[in-house]
Image (spheres, rainbow, N blue to C red):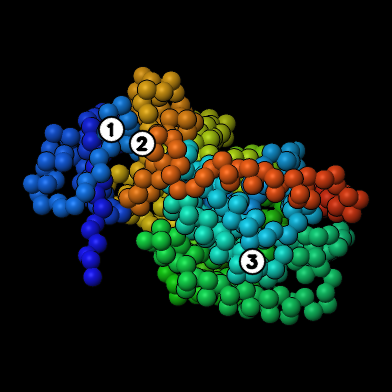
């Protein structure tokens, strides 16, 4: 049998991000990548092809000329929903609850090919803008089938990106219970019907569906988790704190631990959600998660906007779960601002995400990084408490790595760490004249300087060209398919009425919470 040789990639004469160097820039260095790991970083004079050969390295050594380039760790998008790609730019001026009714009422039911196209389009946009890893909280407008999840995983495998896919599921909608108590009928909407509707046996029915879903996900995780040279992960995605029971959360964590995977769940994104959870459980979501012993480092919590109580923040810090900031989506939907400064001050690891492309509305993490560094200034009068550029950037790298359960393996250019590296062109107008590295990456860069992208030791973007997928063909098929989806048509009378009913419920709850302030 022929013995396989380990691949070697050498980036020579490159400037790189180094927090300890003047202005955060270490000049004229080389990065040696062996297999999927960074093996050595050193001045170019001490690390070159000759020194590698002299040290005993055998086999072909691929060399990238790094002159005029800047190396940074690949960005980690720690929360998105790839199925929303079809509906980017399709809504505005809607808070989350009515927006969800619109989404359920107009998305239709996707095919496996739809899930492939949406995931592939996410991967293309992310890779070309410097994102090398993503956590996809993927949803489906109907019952889950294995082929839908396989299609999403295949898209990420084909694209060459690092990805964790966390399928969304739930077993009890407490928002509908609160709506019932307040005299608002939301159960007849497409959204309500998908969460049990008027079924008298809905609790037993949902438990049976949960059991079958977890059994299918168990087999799916067995087949996909850790595949593609460890690049792909299969997570569990219980939908949100107001949509799950104790049974659902504990079963999800147990199954995740069986496979060495993570759990990803929406966390009090809006005041309506926080109100409903407190009305039903008599306590905050953080208190409940801690009491049922699922508030652990395996759990990542996108949004976490209304985790405001100091006691809840202390719980989050003590238990080690990872909140994920999604500033663009939370602004567009009017949900509020995550208390990022209070979290960082407690030593909480914060990750960063773009959210889905119908609530953000792109997959460019540089946008989210800049927003995270700026929007909190309005909440704090003392500039010493503002989010620094380095804090924002590290949320999009080291923080995202923690959400992927890759802490101390991903998110920085360090020897022994995974080789996810982005090379930026320093000769672009947005990066000249090469001032502070964190400042220019956070406040100046837009993704247009991305030149080469390396994921897991493999070059997947070279000279701004994706090497793994035919992007033009994907865009053409994706665009053609979108024309046939229901959201492109005028709203029917039923969907209009469903949305109007949810608006009335939303106003009722918001009036109650603002009156109590």
Disc with the residue nearer the chain's start (1 vs 3): 1
Residue 287 shows up from this direction: no
Q: Quadrant of residue 21?
A: top left
Residue furthest toward the front?
1
Q: Quadrant of residue 277?
A: bottom right
- Name the residue beneath numbered marker 3: 169
Q: Could you tell me which residue is drawn at 60 percent across and 43 percent down?
A: 475
Q: Is residue 25 left or right of residue 236?
A: left
Q: CA distance from mark 2 to mark 1?
A: 8 Å
Q: Nearer the viewer, residue 267 or 138?
A: 138
Q: Quadrant of the C terminus?
A: top right
Residue 232 shows up from this direction: yes
Q: Position of residue 279 (x, y in %)?
A: 72, 62
At label 2, counting other C-alpha atoms closer than 10 Å, the crowd grade (few under 14, some 14-19, many 20 or more) is many
Q: Is residue 128 left or right of residue 478?
A: left
At label 3, counting other C-alpha atoms closer than 10 Å, the crowd grade (few under 14, some 14-19, many 20 or more) is many
- Name the residue beneath numbered marker 1: 66
Residue 423 circle label: 2
Q: Could you tell me which residue is drawn at 55 percent across and 65 percent down?
A: 150
Q: Is residue 95 left or right of residue 15?
A: right
Whether the residues at callouts 2 and 1 have beta carbons within 8 Å, the answer is yes
Disc with the residue nearer the chain's start (2 vs 1): 1
Q: Position of residue 269 (x, y in %)?
A: 64, 51
Q: Could you tell me which residue is drawn at 70 percent across and 49 percent down?
A: 481
Q: Nearer the viewer, residue 257 or 82?
A: 82
Q: 371 above or below 280?
A: above
Q: Could you tell me which residue is drawn at 12 percent across and 38 percent down?
A: 46
Q: Quadrant of the N terminus?
A: bottom left
Q: CA distance from mark 1 to mark 3?
A: 45 Å
Q: CA distance from mark 3 to mark 2?
A: 38 Å
């Amino acid at each position: 049998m022929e013995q396989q040789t380990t691949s070697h990639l050498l980036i020579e004469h490159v400037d790189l991000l180094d927090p300890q160097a003047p202005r955060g820039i270490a000049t004229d260095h080389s990065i040696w990548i062996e297999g999927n790991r960074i093996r050595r970083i050193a001045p170019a004079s001490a690390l070159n092809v000759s020194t590698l050969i002299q040290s005993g390295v055998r086999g072909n050594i691929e060399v990238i000329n790094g002159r005029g380039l800047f190396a940074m760790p690949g960005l980690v998008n720690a929360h998105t929903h790839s199925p929303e790609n079809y509906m980017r730019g399709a809504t505005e001026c809607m808070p989350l609850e009515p927006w969800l009714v619109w989404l359920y009422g107009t998305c239709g039911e996707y095919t496996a090919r739809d899930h492939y196209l949406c995931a592939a389009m996410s991967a293309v946009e992310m890779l070309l803008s410097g994102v090398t890893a993503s956590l996809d909280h993927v949803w489906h407008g109907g019952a889950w089938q294995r082929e839908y999840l396989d299609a999403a995983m295949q898209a990420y495998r084909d694209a060459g990106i690092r990805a964790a896919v966390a399928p969304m599921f739930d077993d009890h909608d407490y928002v509908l219970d609160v709506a019932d108590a307040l005299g608002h009928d939301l159960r007849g909407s497409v959204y309500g019907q998908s969460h049990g509707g008027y079924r008298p046996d809905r609790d037993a029915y949902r438990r049976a569906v949960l059991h079958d879903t977890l059994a299918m996900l168990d087999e799916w995780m067995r087949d996909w988790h850790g595949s593609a040279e460890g690049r792909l992960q299969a997570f569990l995605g219980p939908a949100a704190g107001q949509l799950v029971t104790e049974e659902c959360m504990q079963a999800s964590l147990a199954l995740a631990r069986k496979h060495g995977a993570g759990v990803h769940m929406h966390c009090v994104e809006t005041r309506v959600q926080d109100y409903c959870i407190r009305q039903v459980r008599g306590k905050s979501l953080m208190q409940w998660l801690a009491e049922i012993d699922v508030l652990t480092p395996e759990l990542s919590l996108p949004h976490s906007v209304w985790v405001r109580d100091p006691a809840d923040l202390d719980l989050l810090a003590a238990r080690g779960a990872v909140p994920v900031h999604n500033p663009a989506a939370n602004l567009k939907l009017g949900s509020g601002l995550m208390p990022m400064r209070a979290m960082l001050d407690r030593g909480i690891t914060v990750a960063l995400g773009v959210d889905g492309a119908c609530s953000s509305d792109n997959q460019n993490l540089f946008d989210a990084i800049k927003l995270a560094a700026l929007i909190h200034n309005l909440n704090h009068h003392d500039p010493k408490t503002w989010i620094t550029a380095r804090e924002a950037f590290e949320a999009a790298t080291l923080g995202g790595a923690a959400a992927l359960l890759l802490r101390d393996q991903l998110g920085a250019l360090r020897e022994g760490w995974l080789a996810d590296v982005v090379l930026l062109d320093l000769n672009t107008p947005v990066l000249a004249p090469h001032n502070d590295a964190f400042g220019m990456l956070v406040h100046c860069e837009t993704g247009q300087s991305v030149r080469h992208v390396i994921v897991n030791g493999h070059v997947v973007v070279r000279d701004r060209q994706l090497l793994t997928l035919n992007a033009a063909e994907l865009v053409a098929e994706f665009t053609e398919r979108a024309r046939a989806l229901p959201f492109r048509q005028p709203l029917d009378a039923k969907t209009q009425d469903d949305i109007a009913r949810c608006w009335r419920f939303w106003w009722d709850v918001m009036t109650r919470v603002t009156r109590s302030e």
